[in-house]
Image: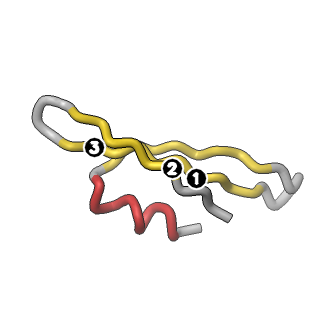
Amino acid sequence: MAKKTVATLQSSSKRLTKAIKMVKSPKTGAYTFVESVMAPERVNDWLNKK
């Protein structure tokens, strides 16, 4: 289960996006949040991979 939260970050030369997804731990069953800053084109690929 992934929760899609995307915020756009502006820097001087590049446009970056911060994506946050919710990942369920196979051991405990608890959810954790994983954050990453990347180019906007790569967000969907990152959210879809397990």
Q: Element under label 3?
A: strand
Disc 2 crowd, CA 10 A, few/some/many (<14, 14-19, 20+): few
The image shows residue 45, relative to residue 28, as above or below, that is below
Q: Picture coordinates of residue 20 (x, y %)?
A: 53, 47
Name the residue at 34% across, 45% down.
Answer: 17
Q: Mark 1 highlights which residue? A: 21
Q: In the structure shown, which secondary structural element does the residue marked by tag 2 occupy?
A: strand
Number of the label disc, if any, that sits on residue 43: none
Instruction: Identify the residue at horizontal 68%, vertical 65% (top origin).
Output: 1
Q: Mark 2 or mark 3: which comes first in sequence?
A: 2
Q: Quadrant of the C terminus?
A: bottom right
Give the residue type that dot 1 points to: Lys
Q: CA distance from mark 2 to mark 1?
A: 7 Å
Residue 16 numbered tag: 3
Cβ atoms under marks 2 and 1 closer than 8 Å = no
Residue 27 percent coordinates (x, y): 86, 56
